[in-house]
Amino acid sequence: MKRKLYIILFLLLATMFGARAQDSVVGSFEAALENHYFWRGQDYGGSNARVTADVGWKGVHFELFGLTLLSENNPANEINLSFYYEWGDFSFGLTDYWFDTDNPNFFDFNVHKTGHVTEAFVEYDFGIVDVAWYTNVLGNDFNDDGDREWASYLEITSAELEWATIRWQGQVGIAPWASEYYDNSHFAVTNLSLKASKEIVATDRLSVPVSLTLSTNPDHGRTYCILGITLKYN
């Protein structure tokens, strides 16, 4: 599995470096606190702290994401590593997800026991909406019968609109076929959300938005109200 991952990463990075994009190194940092961890329609727990660091050059980006659940009764950690290429409104890449609740050994890459799942993604921003497709291609993406699921997800996110001094954004998430990864037995809309946000601090490099998101998983009938505060620097 590791050899295949290295080959894919090499080809991806070779393609990225051969393309034309900005010449300067760019970077951003983001830290956030939320009262609930709800991701692509899945309930992963309560209050959490998360950080994201992104460095890019000539359109090639490396992103590190870390999250910790703050509950004493259900502590958990997640680390994600992303390599992606951005060309105008188009982007594609790979993200490796690791969850210590699945396997606490980060360096265990046994395909049926590892806590790693690697997905490929492609995304295009049409202006009015941003459309992204994600498919698991490596790692522990097997059902109970031992078959690889190729679990996939289609995400459609609206552009931000400002009304009454508040920014609004909607999102729809769809799991197109059955998968244990998204806990759906058929084609399913797993996420409908509406996010309202307001910046309490804003400068050229720093912003501190506070957000309130109403999210529901129609397939499971669950609904959440998520409050978050984020520190962004770029």
Image: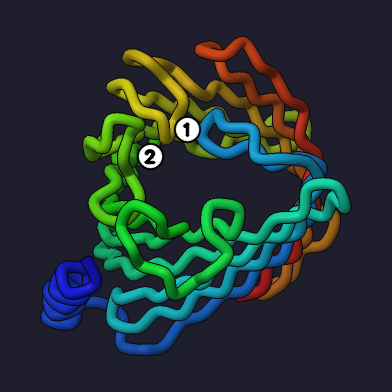
Q: Which residue is mark 2?
A: 130
Can see residue 144?
yes
- Residue 66, x across and y down, in percent: 61, 66
> With 45 as the anchor, is 104 left or right in this view?
left
Q: State whether residue 7 is above or below residue 211.
A: below
Marks 2 and 1: in contact by CB < 8 Å? yes
Q: How many numbered discs sit on the rendered protein?
A: 2
> With 174 as the anchor, is 233 left or right in this view?
right
Density class for disc 1 (Cα within 10 Å; few <14, some 14-19, many ≥20) is some
- Residue 195, x across and y down, in percent: 66, 33
Give the amino acid at mark 1: Ser
> With 45 as the anchor, is 12 left or right in this view?
left
- Residue 68, x across and y down, in percent: 72, 60
> With 162 as the anchor, is 97 left or right in this view?
left
Residue sitting at x 57%, y 14%: 220
Q: Residue 20: which quarter of the image?
A: bottom left
Mark 1 vs mark 2, CA separation in Å:
6 Å
Q: State whether residue 96 is above or below residue 146.
A: below
Q: Which residue is mark 1?
A: 158
Q: State whether residue 14 is above or below residue 40.
A: below
Give the amino acid at mark 2: Asp
N-term-proximal mark, 1 vs 2: 2
- Residue 52, x across and y down, in percent: 59, 68
Give whichever of 99, 205 is nearer the camera. 99
Quarter of the image with the C terminus is bottom right
Outermost residue to the bottom: 24
Secondary structure under tag 1 reads strand
